[in-house]
Amino acid sequence: MVARSTATASEHWSSGARWLGIGSSIGILAIGILYAAVITLWVIIEGAPRDPIGDPYLAVMEGLTMASALAFLGLVTAIWCFADARRRLPALTALLVGSLAVGLTMTVHFVQLTAIRQLWRAGRLGDYRLVWPSALFAVEYFAWDILVGVSMVAAGFALAGGPAAARARRCLLIGGMLCLIGASGPLSGRMFMQNVAVFGYAVVLPIAGALTARLFRTVSPDGAA
């Protein structure tokens, strides 16, 4: 259980923010599981595929990515509401940087699911898939590797409290650092390093979601455990 005094509780913390945090955290975990399930299904059905993933799997994954981005925005918003006065700066950093990341990735996948596919069907593009190197993919990597990485690290520093908060903080910090390290892949052209970032936001972030959901469940709106 988390012990948190009323004196340090944020004035913005409310039951609505608490349920936003719980719902967003569980959403991140659930979407992460669904994302892995889609990839597994693709591998099973296609049988050791060599080509980049395509529709209908890619379309589903892009939709899940957009949903995950919105859940992440809900999470950093709840963390901003949760943070006490001493941690308002990292909480605000997580919210602002996370909002930018969400806006960019939502834009990328909206363009992908609409204009890019329509241009491809009309024969004006050779491929609709996100294949490196491409401008849209670079924006996507910037959003998830760098911006989500910074936001996760800042969100980790924004959490304070007992064991539940410590576990969530540790997971967010580890995941954020992995994202930032993975950014060296697109920056250097050594794309195997991008897998480090993928592990950060596709594996560690959903785990952090489970931990933050537990954290938010243990704290009442008045700051009592």
Image (cartoon, rainbow, N blue to C red):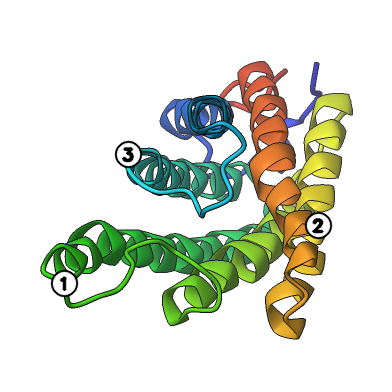
Name the residue: 48% across, 26% down: 45
Q: Secondary structure at mark 1?
A: loop
Name the residue: 85% across, 32% down: 167
Q: Looking at numbered disc 1 in the image, what kind of residue is underneath it?
A: Gly
- Image position of 111 (left or right of 154): left
Q: Which numbered disc, 2 or 3, marks the residue that appears first in the sequence?
A: 3
Q: Which numbered disc, 1 or 3, marks the residue that appears first in the sequence?
A: 3
Q: Looking at numbered disc 3 in the image, what kind of residue is underneath it?
A: Pro
Name the residue: 45% across, 82% down: 135
Q: Secondary structure at mark 3?
A: loop
Name the residue: 36% across, 66% down: 108
Residue under pointer 1: 123
| Residue 84 seen by the camera | no
Q: Residues within 10 Å of mark 1 (few under 14, many from 20)?
A: few
> Quarter holding the C terminus?
top right
| Residue 111 seen by the camera | yes
- Image position of 110 (left or right of 124): right
Please tell me in which quadrant of the rendered image residue 121 appears.
bottom left
Residue under pointer 3: 56
Residue under pointer 2: 178
Q: Residues within 10 Å of mark 2 (few under 14, many from 20)?
A: many
Q: Position of residue 118 (x, y in %)?
A: 14, 64
Q: Looking at numbered disc 2 in the image, what kind of residue is underneath it?
A: Leu
Please tell me in which quadrant of the rendered image residue 55 appears.
top left
